[in-house]
Structures are given as C-alpha cells and as structure tokens.
Image (cartoon, rainbow, N blue to C red):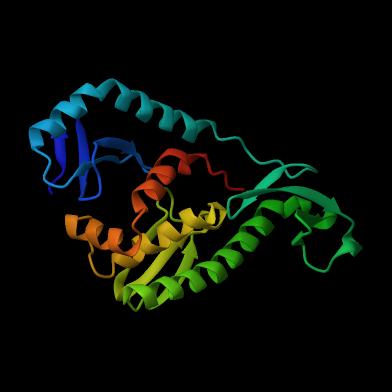
Amino acid sequence: MTPLAVDDLTLEVRESSRRKTLEITVDREGELVIAAPTGTDEQRLRDFVIEKRLWIYQKLTQKAERRRRLPQKEYVNGEGFLYLGRSYRLKCVPNDAQDAPLKLVAGRFQLREYALPDARDHFFRWYTARASDWLTVKVGEHARRMGVEPAGVTVQDLGYRWGSCGKGNRVYFHWKTILLPRHIAEYVVAHELVHLHEPHHTPAFWRRLERAMPDYEQRKGWLARHGIEVEGV
C-alpha cells in the first residue's frame, strides 16, 4: 500500500491478517507507521490518524527531546553498560589484573586503569566484535530457516538505522544491536533477511516477515517505543 498522507503527516501502512485493531507507532528514525487489519478502508485510516494527531505530535516531540537529552556515559565504578538487554556495572581494575583492556567477567565489565583515557574506544571495539560474532551466528540460523543466502555480515555505525540490506546481498547492522534484548535483536536480523526477498516495505514484505516471525509486530512495537532509549558508549 502506498504511504498515507494526512495533512502534514505521512505514515507507512502495514497490513496484517492477524491484526484486529489499528495502531500507530513512531519508529527509531521518527518514521510514522500505522498497523491495520488487511483490507482496512482508507477513510477509516485517515479518521484514526486525525483522532490520534495530538498524540502523534507529542510522540514526535518526545522522541526529538530524547535524542537531545540522552545522558553521556561516565567510565567510573558502578556505571551501567548494556549487553543483549542486560545492564552490567563497570569496575576499574589494576593494570595487572587482566590481559585485555576490557572484559566482561562474572557479571561486570572490567576496565584496566591504563585504558580509562580511551574507554569509549575500547567499549566500541568490544561491542563491535561481540556484535559481529553474535549476529553472524543468528543470521546463519535465520537464513537457513528462511531460505535466503546473505553474502555476509557487516557491523558498523548506521546512524539511526538498526540494519540495512546492501548490494550483493550483504546485510549490515548497527553495532548497538548487541545492546538490545535478544528477541528484539533477532527481529532486526529477520527484518533485514526478508529484504533479500522483498527490497521495499510492501505488503508482501510484511506478510513474509510474519511467516518467518509470527510475533514480529510485538517486537517491532517494542523497538519503536524503546529503541531510542538504548544508550551507547
């Protein structure tokens, strides 16, 4: 279905035969999405958007404020850092306590004292390496089940996008994907793999994703509501 334009708002319409009600979400990039039962009349969609217009404006404003106000991480004892949906506290340790600058040991991130001036870089490299390993495994598992053959996995900073499907069937993921809860990160994987069949967010795309992950709407909804709250380093 083509995008739905209502005054100054443009929404992507996603239909599902499993859905019984209408729902509007604002995704991580500020994109407006209206989920609807298959075959919903366009006027009903327009009326729903008009009814929810104040709420939509409030959500867009809140999302913009959150982007501006995300707190900066401090590399001090007790600061929390996410990994696959769980928060682990940081502990600064003596230089002779471990060989690597940064490790996750017994439920704590341990950072050697000499590494403190470059702590952000060490976290970024640690997360990127773990994301590459974990996502490569998950891409392989889901690709076999979904009957697709991605050319490979690349992890990098994608700005406000969680994932992307590039030329040559290579899939790209934001390194922050490794901060998400496991089932949400797997939604990002499945979403990008469906793009190997369907390049655009057409009804066929969402039907194929629904077959691969029947509860994708719940996972997508969580990501739209909470993704912006995922703090980096």
- Residue at the location (38% across, 48% down)? 220
Q: Percent x, y for residue 158?
A: 43, 55
Kindly tell me whether residue 79 is visible in this rendering.
Answer: yes
**Residue 209 in the image: above or below residue 61:** below
Front-most of 21 and 72? 21
Occupied quadrant, residue 59? top left
Kindly tell me whether residue 6 is visible in this rendering.
Answer: no
- Residue at the location (56% across, 53% down)? 179
**Residue 109 in the image: above or below residue 192:** above
Q: Is residue 131 left or right of residue 200?
A: right
Q: Percent x, y for residue 112?
A: 82, 57
Numbered disc total: 0
- Residue at the location (42% across, 32% down)? 63
Q: Percent x, y for residue 97?
A: 89, 62
Front-most of 184 and 178? 184
Q: Is residue 77 left or right of residue 132?
A: right
Front-most of 120 and 224? 224
Occupied quadrant, residue 70? top right
Q: Percent x, y for residue 135?
A: 50, 67
- Residue at the location (29% across, 35% down)? 24
Q: Is residue 233 left or right of residue 16?
A: right
